[in-house]
Amino acid sequence: MKLTGYLAWRGYSPSTRTVDSVTFVIGSGVVPPVSDSLRRSFSPDTAGQGIGFIIHEGTDSTVTAWSARAGVLNATSASYGSGHAVGSTFTVYHGTMVGDYDISLARGVADTTSLNSAAVSFPTGVRAVKIRITGVIP
C-alpha cells in the first residue's frame, strides 16, 4: 500500500508553539503524479481516492473539525535524497513535493451543518518526507 499526503498549518505562534488550524489530506496515489478526489471516506488500496480534514482550535481551546466531502489532492512531482534506515523496518527519505490540495466542501464532524474549505498550492515545492516500511510491524 502506498499513500501520498499533505500536512499544513496556519497561525503558528512561536511564543506558545501552537497553531490555529491544521489541514491533513491523504490519498491512495502511488507516487507523483497523483490526482485523487477527496471523499468522506476512502480505501487506501483504491487509487484515485483520498480524504481530508480541517482542524481548528479556538482561543478558548475549543476544537472544531471538518471532514472533506469534495475536493482534490494533487502531487505533480517529488524528489528525495538517499534514505536513512531507522532500525530494520523504516527508511526515511527527505525531499521536496510539488502540487496542491483543494478541500472544496468540508462538513463538521460533530455538526454536519457547519461548512469549511481550504486550498493551498505549492508550485515551487514544499518539504517532503517519504517513509518506506518493510517487514512486519508488531
Image: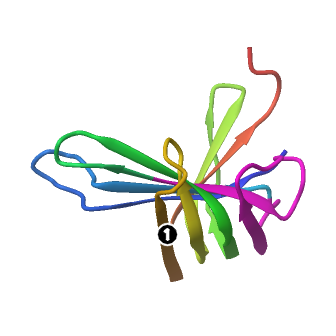
* Segment tinted magenta in the rendering: 29-54
**Residue 77 in view here:** yes
What kind of colouring is applied to the model shown? Answer: rainbow
Question: Horizontal and vertical percent for residue 81?
Answer: 61, 61
**Circle 1 residue:** 117
> 20 and 76: which one is in front?
20
> 76 and 129: which one is in front?
76
Q: Quadrant of residue 37?
A: bottom right
State the residue at coordinates (15%, 53%).
14
Q: Quadrant of residue 105?
A: bottom right
Residue 42 on the magenta span: yes
Asked if residue 20 is positioned above or below residue 116 in the image, the reply reads: above
Left or right, 56 with respect to 116, comes to left
State the residue at coordinates (35%, 56%).
21
Question: In the rendered picture of this protein, how many numbered marks are placed on residues?
Answer: 1
Q: Quadrant of residue 62?
A: top left
Question: Horizontal and vertical percent for residue 85?
Answer: 64, 37
State the residue at coordinates (79%, 55%).
28
Residue occupying the far bottom of the picture: 123
Asked if residue 44 is positioned above or below residue 114 in the image, the reply reads: above
Residue occupying the far right of the picture: 46
Residue neighbourhood size for the residue with mark 1, other residues' Cα within 10 Å, grouped as few (<14), some (14–19), many (≥20): some
Q: Amino acid at mark 1?
A: Ser
Question: Horizontal and vertical percent for residue 18?
Answer: 23, 47
Mark 1: secondary structure: strand
